[in-house]
Image: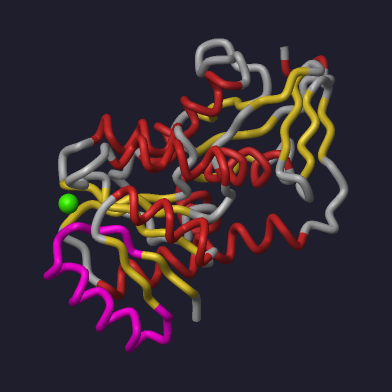
Amino acid sequence: MAQVLLVEDDAEIRRALIHALSQLGHAVMTAGDGMRGLQMALDAAPDLVVLDLGLPDMDGRDVLRMLRSVSQVPIIVATARDQETAIVEALDRGADDYLSKPFGAVQLDARIRAVLRRTAGGRAGANAPLVAGGLRIDLAAREVVLDDAPVELSAREFDLLSYLAARAGTVVSKRELINEVWHQPYSGTDKTVDVHLSWLRRKLGESAREPRYLHTVRGIGVKFVPYADPSSR
Ligand code: CA
């Protein structure tokens, strides 16, 4: 059960989700526009925010940016289908996950639980930092430093990197990543892992063609190679 703030201007969607999420055991509060959403997110301190990107008063991405600048509350963005650039931008700006409309309450509930599991795991962190060459992954603080410079990662990118780094030297399949990092069933056609890997690589200053830590093993998956290992070059 979680305290969920739903920021959504469509009254019908609000009603339906309040009803369904309450049935699933969540406490739901709602805001019908971005300004009120921001206010409630700060005043009521919900466990998680579901943010519609298409709001009447403000661009949802600006709401996200403003909220993220003052709060670490987990955020799931909701967006109309085929708004891929908006989704990418939202994830870049710190959204923890997204849903394409129309979506059902059961799917939303699954995402809420997955995001809360991930973020709670991050807070619990009694784990020692993972260090590989110039890369240091602090699991407790959820911070990454590369060659003495901090690297800003989204929650998902951090989870992906730490999952791979914890299995350094082992090839991890996309199926495993989708199941264990995304907590979703694997469809086989999904480009999610590839997209997040390429963002992660960009932030680590490497590419699929010139990998440093994240090596693609064609047809199988991806392998984290500690940079200090000379056989990786
Ligand atoms: Ca809307």
Given residues 199 and 233, the one toward you in this image is: 199
Given residues 14 and 120, the one toward you in this image is: 14
Given residues 43 and 27, the one toward you in this image is: 43
Check if residue 211 falls in the magenta segment: no
- On the picture, is 22 further left or further right than 42? left
Q: Give the range drawn in magenta.
A: 6-27
Residue at left offset 49%, top offset 39%: 94
Res. 231 in view: no
- Tell me which colouring the rendered structure shows: secondary structure
Res 32 quadrant in image = bottom left
Given residues 165 and 11, the one toward you in this image is: 11
- On the picture, is 93 further left or further right than 148? left
- On the picture, is 162 further left or further right than 173? right
Res 134 quadrant in image = top right
Check if residue 10 falls in the magenta segment: yes
Q: In this view, does 148 lie above or below 25?
A: above
Q: Is residue 57 above or below residue 100?
A: above
Residue at left offset 26%, top offset 53%: 33
| Residue 215 in picture, x, y percent from top left | 59, 25
Res. 230 in view: yes
| Residue 200 in picture, x, y percent from top left | 54, 28
Q: Quadrant of the C terminus?
A: top right
Count of picture labels: 0
Residue at left offset 51%, top offset 18%: 208
Res 108 quadrant in image = bottom left
| Residue 24 in picture, x, y percent from top left | 37, 85
